[in-house]
Amino acid sequence: MVDLNDPPEGEMAELEVDLNPPCVLVFNASDPSGAGGLGGDALAIASVGAHMLGVVTGAYARDTAEVFDHFAFDEEAVAEQTRAILEDVEVQLIKVGFVGSPETLSTIAETATDYPDVPVVAYMPNLSWWDENQIESYLDAFRELVLPQTTVLVGNHSTLWRWLLPDWAGEKPPTARDIARAAGEQGTPYTLVTGIMLPDQFIDNVLASPQSVLASEKYERLEAVFAGAGDTLSAALAALLASGTDLPAAASEALSYMDRCLDAGFRPGMGHVLPDRLFWAQPEDEDDDDEADEPPDFALPPHDTRH
């Protein structure tokens, strides 16, 4: 017997979709240290309320201090993973991390071309650990194939400067808008430039287009050396944009999330400090012994980041 109060089947399906978290298709490598890669992306994306669809593009050989090598997947293996999940799940955003080869970049560019209405967040890490010839061919392919498909490019000031403005001859370092103009010439409308050094132990992080600065967040420089900050920021930004947050607000919230992850950072090995992407789930410090004797409260503490 049909309950006349129940919504029709089609409406139920739409309701289920509305209740689902937004899905972010992520291209990145496996990182055994947990500093970055797909594992770090999954934690950050889940923390701000989205669901990651992870496509493995390769694997790092690394510890918490340095990257020793990277083993890239064949581009057809990447394409098969991508094809399978896109035939099943609707994605709200594509995030591109380090994928290891120009051939895989080509596969990703083809995917983005097939889904022109899906925004792309691309993160360019520091590749100084890699072979110089491999770096050059990778950056050339990224510039030619991925930047024209990218909605927001994320990267450290010095990394983006040396990549996009290698012949910079100004007396002062290029500004975020200078870098955004260079990215804009390749078709990227927005660039989030991090780690701009300021006086008095502060760093600036600027979201810019070729025409203007859209947002700026300044933070006090932390003394520790971190691994995985850029992965954390770009993943959080991707999840927030997939959730429907407008770009300046998403950039501001993602930067705040990254800052709190770094502030709660931990050192699991003998190398760098890693961001604690689940800082919000940790119990708060007890102020006195009486409180310490109370039974544990297993409810998640309130926080500003998780949606």
Image (tube, rainbow, N blue to C red):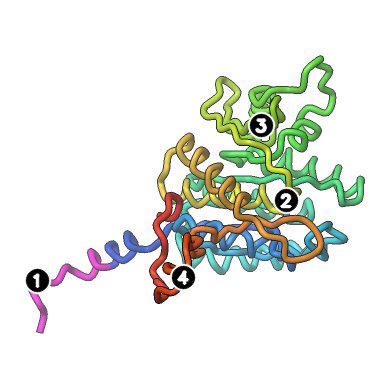
| Label annotation for residue 226 | 2
Q: Is residue 189 visible?
A: no
Which quadrant is the C terminus positioned in?
bottom left
Mark 3 highlights which residue?
A: 202
* Residue type, mark 3 in image: Phe
Q: Residue 197 got which mark?
A: none
* Callout in the foreground (1, 2): 2
What's the distance in space between the residues labelled 2 and 3, CA to CA?
16 Å
Query: For this rendering, which residue is in front, 96 or 226?
Result: 226
| Mark 4, residue position | 292
Identify the secondary structure beneath mark 3: strand
State the image coordinates of residue 224 (x, y, percent, origin top left): 73, 48
- Alpha-carbon span between mark 3 and mark 4: 37 Å
The residue mark sitting in front, 1 or 3, is 3
Asked whether 52 or 46 is in front, the reply is 46
Residue at the bottom extreme of this rendering:
1
- Whether residue 276 appears in magenta in the rendering, the answer is no
Q: Dividing the picture into quarters, in which one does residue 140 lie?
A: top right
Q: Residue furthest top?
A: 171
Circle 3 Cα neighbour tier, 10 Å, few/some/many (<14 / 14–19 / ≥20): some
The spot of residue 298 in percent (x, y) is 41, 72
Asked where in the image residue 268 lies, by quadrant, the reply is bottom right
In three-dimensional space, the C-alpha distance between marks 1 and 2, rounded to whole angstroms, equals 56 Å
What's the magenta region? 1-12
Residue in the image at 24% along x and 67% along y: 12
Residue at 72% across / 33% down in the picture?
157
Mark pair 4, 1: CA separation: 50 Å
- Which quadrant holds the N terminus? bottom left
Work out whether 204 lies above or below 3: above
Mark in the foreground, 4 or 1 = 4
Mark 1 Cα-neighbour bin, 10 Å: few <14, some 14–19, many ≥20 = few
